[in-house]
Image (cartoon, rainbow, N blue to C red):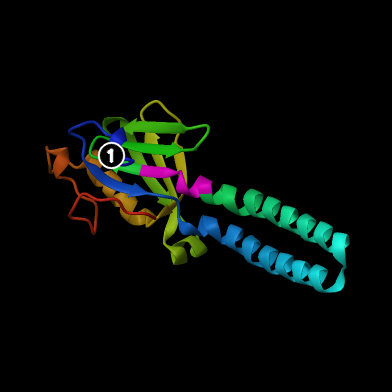
């Protein structure tokens, strides 16, 4: 049983599992491509124009600098994206994030008093946005970069406030008839 199923109670049904929108990976990609191109150019230049020890020193320095930039500006954001989970079940909303320092938020469906979303023009084009969940006696919680935020909003609203169904396990997300994971 994989994540997030291992975080669920035995009779809890997974309705939605998503990572943040892939737009979070645009900057890392835009850093990786030019950094790699520049590093490749500098390594080639050093190998053809410099002799012996100077060539080896420049190549090592360029590769260390390239690796530092790639880890700091590309790998770390990718791992942050990959380890962030937004999960909706028939009983609660869960948000989990982190590798070394793991944090999470659980909001029981019965405590949700309001569900909102917002997205600007670019977010609308990318089909993403911010989901705002207000729970009883707590400040609103905002979840940024939720893919397909309007359908997630509808799913949460129906699951938390559906007055036509007394059986919450019958709630299903839009476009999903089976229990499975969906990455954003």
Residue 41 lies in what quarter of the image? bottom right
Check the image and report above or below for 1 versus 20: above
Task: Please give the range of residues in magenta.
Answer: 79-86
Q: How many neighbours does mark 1 have within 10 angstroms: few (below 14), some (14-19), or many (20 or more)? A: some
Q: Residue furthest bottom?
A: 48
Query: Percent position (x, y) of residue 91?
Result: 24, 35
Q: Is residue 175 magenta?
A: no
Query: Percent position (x, y) of residue 161?
Result: 23, 40
67 or 174, which is in the foreground?
Answer: 67
Query: Percent position (x, y) of residue 147?
Result: 40, 55
Query: Percent position (x, y) of residue 99?
Result: 49, 37
Name the side, left or right, on which 43 lies relative to 94. right
Check the image and report above or below for 84 versus 105: below
Q: Which residue was labeled with disc 1?
A: 5
Q: Residue at x 12, y 38 (%)?
A: 167
Q: How many marks?
A: 1
């Amino acid at each position: 049983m994989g994540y997030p199923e291992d975080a669920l109670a035995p009779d809890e049904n997974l309705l939605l599992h998503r990572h943040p929108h892939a737009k979070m990976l645009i900057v890392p990609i835009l850093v990786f491509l030019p950094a790699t191109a520049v590093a490749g150019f500098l390594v080639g230049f050093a190998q053809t124009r410099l002799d012996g020890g100077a060539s080896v020193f420049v190549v090592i320095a360029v590769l260390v600098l390239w690796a530092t930039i790639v880890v700091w500006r590309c790998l770390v954001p990718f791992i942050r994206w990959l380890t962030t989970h937004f999960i909706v079940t028939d009983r609660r909303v869960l948000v989990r994030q982190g590798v070394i320092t793991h944090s999470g938020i659980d909001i029981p469906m019965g405590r949700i008093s309001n569900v909102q979303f917002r997205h600007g023009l670019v977010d609308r084009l990318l089909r993403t946005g911010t989901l705002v969940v207000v729970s009883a006696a707590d400040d609103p919680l905002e979840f940024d970069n939720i893919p397909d935020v309007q359908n997630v909003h509808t799913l949460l609203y129906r699951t938390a406030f559906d007055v036509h169904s007394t059986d919450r396990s019958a709630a299903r997300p839009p476009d999903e008839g089976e229990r499975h994971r969906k990455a954003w």
